[in-house]
Image: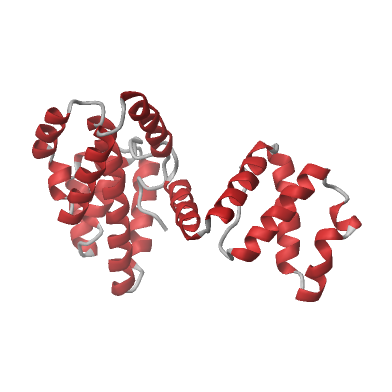
Amino acid sequence: MRPPGLRGRGPGGPDRPLRALFLRVAPLSPEEQQRALETDELFQQLPPMARERFRRRLEEFNSRPPERRQQMLERWGSAAQRQDAQVLFLRLAPLPPEEQGTALDADAAFQKMPPQMQERFRFHLEEFNSRPPEERERMLERFRRFAELSPEEQREVRRRARLFAQMSPQQRDQAHRIFQAWQQLPADRRQVLMERLRQLQAATPEERRGLPENPSFLAPLAENERQVLRGLWELRQQLPEARPSRPR
């Protein structure tokens, strides 16, 4: 379950005010929640179906044990702060350094961030400012593309980054080549490969040893697809968490 506003794509989506409303009323008792919603202008302006959907999510949240509710609120709050930081960085990065500092001092969302997060934000901004102009522009474009991803897709990108950090240089080179080849395949062919990977994962150790070279198992795949499959499976054996994204 996610609160309204954490389902949309990117940190700047139209559901951000709903996300903030959910995070504000969720810690209250059910009676206080209802009173807060009845007096909230944004909530009252929502279409009836959106209000009903919001209330159902709130009721589902209330049904959880107190410890679970606290964990969920902390996780959602952290996700909201990360999205706010992305929006703020994209807004400030193109400015001159002196204007960046002035904007940070006056930004309410930044002042509410934990001190460690503020320090990390300033460090990344200073590091960004130290790069040549052409590189800063390329970095900004990558940041914009990342910000447009859904929260789930952003988590997948971060997970892959952690995996790459654990790899040896040789493993990173291998993974880069494999994932490049994977991305070049059409979505329907990636789906076929995903099915073969699932079969490998579900097979017994004895069955699994022969499958990557079994002609009937490989029959639907072209030679380049077979190479990608073998590479993915080899990488999967080296790093149990490594796997390509599901095709969309």
Q: Is residue 19 left or right of residue 150?
A: left
Q: How many marks?
A: 0
What is the quadrant of residue 73 in the picture?
A: bottom left
Residue at screen point 35% across, 31% down:
140
Across and down, in percent, residue 111 comes to 12, 46
Q: State whether residue 245 appears in this view.
A: no
Image: 145 above or below 152: above
Across and down, in percent, residue 8 comes to 41, 42
Image: 108 above or below 200: above
Q: State whether residue 196 appears in this view.
A: yes
Residue at screen point 28% across, 67% down:
70
Across and down, in percent, residue 38 comes to 20, 48
Q: What colour scheme has been applied to the protein in the rendered image?
A: secondary structure
Q: Nearer the viewer, residue 110 or 68?
A: 110
Residue at screen point 25% across, 47% down:
20
In this view, which residue lies farthest toward the front? Answer: 170
Q: Is residue 167 left or right of residue 197?
A: left
Quarter in which the C terminus is drawn: top right
Q: Is residue 124 left or right of residue 101?
A: right
Quarter in which the N terminus is drawn: bottom left
Residue at screen point 12% across, 29% down:
98
In this view, which residue lies farthest toward the right? Answer: 215
Across and down, in percent, residue 81 comes to 26, 49
